[in-house]
Image (tube, helix red, strand yellow):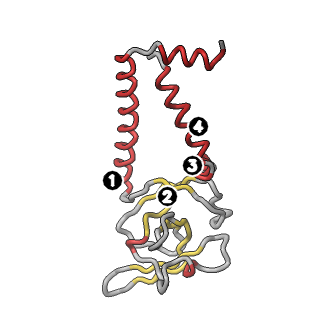
């Protein structure tokens, strides 16, 4: 009969109690993932403790598909640090290096100018109109570590949504047809 026939037979033989147990188990897995994410946010002090490098602008240091681990402390950003920032009017955060830092002596506020290592010019052209510096509220965090190439899964699923739906469907089918 084949794999498809066996899967259909497996789905037909599911009892309501087993289905509820599997739904609760799936809910616990999702809830656990959210709790872990929120805990990481609290520990690291950033709204996004993990980001994926989406372009080649930071090569050779970070390549497209690398995962960066972020933290955000009260310490001011320093020249040379890798920062992840949001710009007003853009949804996707940017990973670049701080090339200039201007610290105001009277307030202690720090203004930051960034540039991708692989770019010829600084990021003023990426900032909002009339903006020449990043301020503290723009910066999501600073990179403290990375994992090479693992982020390609995210890139592929965002560039080819059909793969994401196939993966979610396969995982859902696996949960429904499992006997434990």
Task: Please report whichever mark, 1 or 2, sits nearer to the chain's N-terminal start.
Answer: 1
Q: Which of marks 4 and 1 is in front?
A: 4
Give the residue at the far left of this rendering.
107
Disc assigned to residue 166: 4
Kindly report the distance in space between the C-alpha atoms of the residues bearing marks 4 and 1.
33 Å
Mark 1 sits on what residue?
42
Q: Name the residue under label 2.
A: 144
Residue plotted at (57% across, 51% down) = 158
Q: Can you give x and y, in whole percent of width and height, for residue 74 in the image? A: 35, 67
- Would residue 60 appear left or right of 164 to someone viewing this image? right
Q: Is mark 2 on a helix, strand or loop?
A: strand
Q: Where is residue 24 in the image (x, y as percent from the top left)?
A: 35, 28
x 37%, y 53%: residue: 41
Placement of 51 over or under 90, stated as above or below:
above
Element class at badge 3? helix
Looking at the image, residue 55 lies above or below residue 40: below
Q: Earlier in the sequence, mark 4 or mark 3?
A: 3
* Structural crowding at the residue carrying mark 4, measured as other residues with C-alpha within 10 Å and reported as few (<14), some (14–19) or many (≥20): few
Quadrant assignment for the N terminus = top right
| Whole-percent x, y for residue 118 in the image | 67, 70
Query: Which residue is depicted at the point 46% across and 58% down?
Result: 70
Quick one: SS at disc 1? helix
Secondary structure of residue under mark 4: helix
Q: Is residue 162 left or right of residue 30?
A: right
Comes first in the chain, label 4 or label 1: 1
N-terminal label among 2 and 3: 2
> Looking at this view, is 16 or 172 the one in front?
16
**On the image, numbered disc 3 is attached to which residue?**
154
Structural distance between the alpha carbons of marks 4 and 3: 14 Å
């Amino acid at each position: 009969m084949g794999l498809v026939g066996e899967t259909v037979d497996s789905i037909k033989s599911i009892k309501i109690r087993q289905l509820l147990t599997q739904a609760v188990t799936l809910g616990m897995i999702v809830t656990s993932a959210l709790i872990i994410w929120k805990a990481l946010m609290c520990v690291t002090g950033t709204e996004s403790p993990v980001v994926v490098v989406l372009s080649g602008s930071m090569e050779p240091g970070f390549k497209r598909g690398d995962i960066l681990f972020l933290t955000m402390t009260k310490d001011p950003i320093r020249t040379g640090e890798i920062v992840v920032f949001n710009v007003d009017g853009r949804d996707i955060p940017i990973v670049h290096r701080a090339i200039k830092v201007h610290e105001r002596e009277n307030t202690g506020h720090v203004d930051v100018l960034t540039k991708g290592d692989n770019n010829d010019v600084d990021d003023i052209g990426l900032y909002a109109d009339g903006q020449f510096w990043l301020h503290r509220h723009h910066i999501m965090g600073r990179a403290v570590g990375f994992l090479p190439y693992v982020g390609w899964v995210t890139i592929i699923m965002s560039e080819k949504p059909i793969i994401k739906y196939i993966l979610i469907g396969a995982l859902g089918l696996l949960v429904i047809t499992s006997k434990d």
